[in-house]
Amino acid sequence: MADTENLNAFDYVVQNIDEAIKNGWIKIYYQPVIRSITKELCGAESLARWIDPKIGFLPPDKFIGALENTQQIHKLDCYMVECVCRDIHDLMAKNKPVVPVSVNFSRLDFEMLDMVYFVEQLVAKYDIPRDMLHIEITESMIVSDENLMSQVIRDFRSTGYEVWMDDFGSGYSSLTLLKDFDFDLIKMDMRFLSTFTDKSKQILRSAITMAKDLGIRTLAEGVEKQEHFDFLQSIGCARIQGYFYGKPEPLDEFLRHMEEKNIRFEERKWKNFLDIASFAVRDTDSPLEIVIDNGVSFKTLFMNEPFRKNCTMSMKDSYEEIDRRLYNMASPLAKKFREFANILEKSGNREIFYFTANGKYMKFIGRVLTHLDGRYLIKGMVMDVTNLSSDQKEAARIETRIRELNLLYEVVHLINPDTDSITPLVGSFRYVEEDNNHLYDSLRYGLSTFTLDYVAPDQRNQFKEFFDFNTLRNRIEENKVGYIEEAFKIKQTDGTYEWREIVVMMLTGMGAGEYLFCIKTLPDGLTPGHNVSNDVNSILGLQKIYHNIWENLVWNSSIKFFLKDKNRRFKEVSQAFLDFYGIRSRDDIIGKTDEEMQWHVDDDYNNTEKAIINKGLRVKDAAGQCIVNGVVHNIMCNKMPLYDEGKIIGLVGYFIDSEDELARVNKTKGPSKVDEITNLMNARGCLDAMIGYAIQFNDFGKNYGIIMLCNMNQKRIINTYGKETADKVLFEIGKKIIEVTKQGCAVARPKNAVFAIMTQIEDRKELHNLADFISANVGSIQKANGNSVTLKIKRVFRLRTDPGTTDENIYQSVLEELGDTDV
């Protein structure tokens, strides 16, 4: 074996890189990455090792520089990516545990070829999820060519890959790069730990806190000692890499050593859950704990020293010992914490509880961060308030009294217009959409959302005036009673509007500019408004009556009512109309035509409406069809001219859903044609739609086509994340299809992860383009329930006038061409 000291390594590497790759002399080593709060394996870094049959082991510093200087480094990096993809595929094929792997790149890689495309080809070839590969780039790479690397980072992240900055803090531009570039994770340079001084500790504290403030996850390299790990865990560094848990090793040895050390592999389905938990761990003097509640028992993931002190726990106590002493059912506190947890999990809001323990008066503040498979992640703080100052005690008593308002009000919130803050005090804020996670980020955003979602449209301007913060304080002071109140119609969970009293009261002694925002019900039979019985025969009284009738027709009835002007622009629509079409606000439709709403409108429809406006035609119980978010509805429509002093000024009309009306009359509901998961049509609805398209083809010569696509990775998503996330993927696929097709196509999920899109279309090329556009839009899905997903979309299509195609075989033929869809 040759002497590597005397060998010209540069020339040898340059001349033999192709042979080394071909013969497998380049080996892939893996170094473990551990999640600090669970001590589970959550990833690995791939590293190249050249083991030559002639010269033996060749250190990386002997071949990396040589390959970069001769612009051959891309050969090594492409080889490494393929080896990593193959290893991941092989482990998954054998149903063995697998974790994400980070791969290092050189700037020259991106100059020599389209690396994003290359990686995408390998991911498709080996059929692995994108989130199994993380892209590592260094600070020096970015500084050397910011324009190139900026585009590379955007391309990788937009395609669904995480981009990590390696060796953070090793250069002079780290902070500038965080300002100008988006990273998913930063790796702290190992030199921070090589000199483990108070100064390096403080720098690490600040860097990790700053990263979390920017929404960036953290990893520390070079962890070699228990004290390194303990410190990094205490300050919230999420991931740990270094010889303390393992050196880089070939895959088989890597896996064997993980098993020998009893290090469990983090399941992919829990990655997002645990990322949220890791992100919540902060370096703070406030008492902080992060626990998991499965409904029966609690498991502590993190508890800092101040929290331990308040619970009389030592820093030497393990989390298992803490859970045994604090949360076991024999503990006097266990019942209290179980009650607290149940309230937290039900409300989803920040809650405050007071209790006594060991003769002390304690305050617990908690919030659910996320939940998965019946497990809730809770962030909590507990404080000893026994020895509060008199001012603090007074504030605590006021706080307690505020919570007693829950007996009087549906909603009690503390608001501060000066700081734009809104805080739920009693956790009973019922007027919140489930998917709105930002309601409490801003008072003004919260009020705007509440106004749009829940206040009756005819009172929205009045509601905005009521909450005019420029005049609020003066109005309360002028009222002499410390508060103002007004009644508004508020939308309830069943879609109806009920009167509620909105109260805003000023708080004194609680800080400048703070108010309570409260909502309470009105007694049955009591509604605001004046009595019109005395002036019922007057013009004003009649106007009031007609106004009330109009208001109830428009906002409280089930009539899908609309009014248009002479240019066929919508002037008014009922709430039922908005709900039917899934339109969020009147502002989204008023002043627009059907065409501007991108609704599929044919010539007969236009001509009929023009005849109503120009000739006074009346339409009664006209049968028709419309497509709403992919679902075909059979409707009965009535339209008539709208007159003003004998002149036609527009048209007025309404329609009913025929199936809903039949169900109402017969008091029975037939089999649904809507898929419960996607809100698209199911197999029955798809069959009905196909019959309708066939009738249009045979009776009126209107050609049609069908596109069928399937996510071939659906079974893997089910096995990895469970049914809830898999169903969310199906929902997102349907949503993406509707984004492309608008109201012009009928869309169904007839089975599994198969979607059918039916549309009237004449040209095969146009159908082909639509199929490609839909597939690309669906394939762009990268997240579901916060989890990374990689879809594999297969699509086929058929035009009715294609040779050999009939109404009877068009559906079955595309389904057969799609192949095995039990995936």
Image (spheres, rainbow, N blue to C red):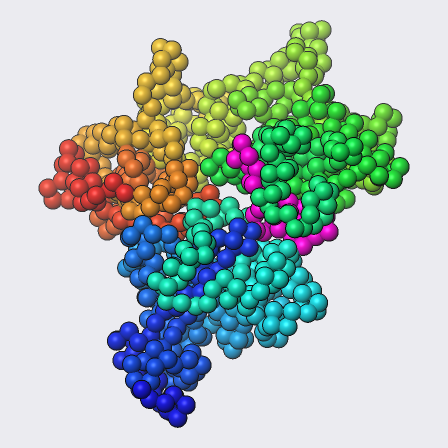
Let me know if residue 51 appears in the view: yes
Pick the residue in front: 568 or 349.
349
Establish if 22 lies above or below 719: below
**Picture layout, residue 122 above or below residue 575:** below
Query: Residue 484 appears in which quarter of the rendering?
Result: top right
Q: Is residue 465 left or right of residue 194?
A: right
Residue placed furthest toward the left: 804
The span shown in magenta is 277-304
Q: Residue at x 70, y 52 (%)?
A: 284
Residue 754 position by quadrant: top left
- The quadrant of the image that shows the C terminus is top left
Q: Quadrant of the N terminus?
A: bottom left
Position above or below: 326 against 199:
above
Q: Position of residue 39 (x, y in %)?
A: 52, 53
Residue at x-position 46% and y-position 37%: 373
- Residue 561, given in percent of the width and then of the height, sits at 47, 23
Which of the two residues, 385 or 575, is positioned nearer the viewer here?
A: 385
To which quarter of the image does residue 368 belong?
Answer: top right
Q: In the displayed structure, does residue 551 sit left or right of residue 781?
A: right
Q: Is residue 290 magenta?
A: yes
Residue 572 picture location, percent across and down: 52, 28
Residue 437 shows in the view: no
Residue 168, position as x, y percentages in the image = 57, 69
- Toward the viewer: 497 or 219? 219
Q: Decide: is 659 above or below 722.
A: above
Left or right of 716: which side holds 438?
right
**Residue at x 46% of width, y 61% of height:** 32
Instruction: Identify which residue is drawn at 69% across, 47% down.
Output: 314
> Magenta segment: does it hold 187?
no
